[in-house]
Image (cartoon, helix red, strand yellow):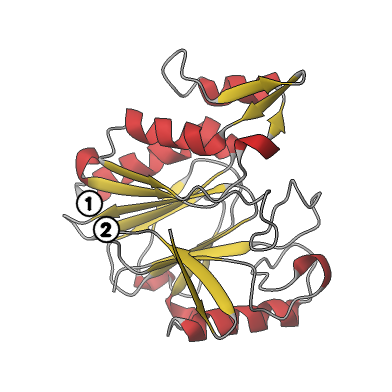
Amino acid sequence: MQRHEAQGLAWYTFPGRWPPHALITRLGGVSRGPFASLNLGHTVGDDPAAVAENHRRLFAQFGLRAAMVVSPHQVHGARVVRVGRAEGGSIVRNCDALITDEPGVVLMMRFADCLPILLYDREHQAIGLAHAGWRGTASGVIAATVEAMKAAFGSRSEALQAGIGPGIGVESYAVGAEVVEAVAATLPPGTPIARWRGGQWYLDLPLAAQRQLESLGVGQITASGLDTAAHTDEWYSHRAERGRTGRFGVLLWLP
């Protein structure tokens, strides 16, 4: 991963040939307390004026306008919506993945342990962005996004490239057996996605996402290796910060 800094903001990008994108840390904003400092979540209890200023700083850094940005109201499901310029500046209700092939349409999502899944089809110049916590992963949001890109743009799995962004790592993600079973049910039998330690299961959510992408035939997969729960200096973590925290953002667009 490549780390960048400017004007107090810090973000990461995937190596290789990707369209413009940014995995944005929590640094460089004006929010205070548990939301410090670049909280982009409107519904976590932060001061709305601070959240608005954080968005202004972020968009200014990348030369974007709010009217270019499309975000979903995320519900930990598997609904995918195709968006374009007509949806610019709006929030798409009740979905966890967005796809587009229209240049200048900025896909934006917010996270605090769940995985950002970025998809790019270089052949057809199309992109997708999905929100995959354990519920979304178990419900098939990754597969649904890949299939939606195939149906909408003619994408081929082997020609897609995927990026797995920052999310909670296995060392921090203690879960019940039912969670492991729900995620494992989406993969070939015997696929190892959890560890048993000290009488507790620990789910490897990034590995589960990678195995799903592999099973879908996605040709190129890059995992960030960034653990939100282990690095709350740069990322918000719902688990590590016991539910009182902000949301970091991910941006992806076609130039």
Q: Quadrant of residue 177?
A: top right
Q: Say left or right for 62 vs 247.
A: left
Q: Which circle, 1 or 2, is nearer the viewer?
A: 2
Residue lying farthest to the left in this orientation: 123
Q: Say left or right for 43 vs 10.
A: right
Locate residue 157, reporting x and y percent. Answer: 24, 39
Quadrant the N terminus occupies:
bottom left
Locate residue 73, reporting x and y percent. Answer: 59, 57
Number of marks drawn? 2
Residue occupying the point 56% across, 57% down? 93
Determine if residue 140 is in view.
no
Residue occupying the point 73% across, 50% down? 238
Disc on the earlier residue, 1 or 2:
2
User: Which label number is shown at residue 126?
Assistant: 2
Locate residue 229, reporting x and y percent. Answer: 68, 49
Locate residue 170, reporting x and y percent. Answer: 61, 35
Query: Which amino acid does the dot numbered 1 rest on?
Result: Phe
Residue occupying the point 67% across, 79% down? 29
Q: Say left or right for 99 vs 235.
A: left
Q: Identify the secondary structure beneath mark 1.
A: helix
Q: Residues within 10 Å of mark 1 (few under 14, many from 20)?
A: some
Quadrant the C terminus occupies:
bottom left
* Foreground residue among 133 and 95: 133
* Foreground residue among 13 and 125: 13
Identify whether 35 is placed above or below 176. Answer: below
Whole-angstrom CA distance, mark 1 to mark 2, is: 7 Å
Identify whether 140 is placed above or below 21. Answer: above
* Foreground residue among 144 and 35: 35
User: Which label number is shown at residue 216?
Assistant: none
Query: Which amino acid does the dot numbered 2 rest on?
Result: Ala
Residue on which disc 1 sits? 153
Q: Are marks 1 and 2 in contact (CB under 8 Å)?
A: yes
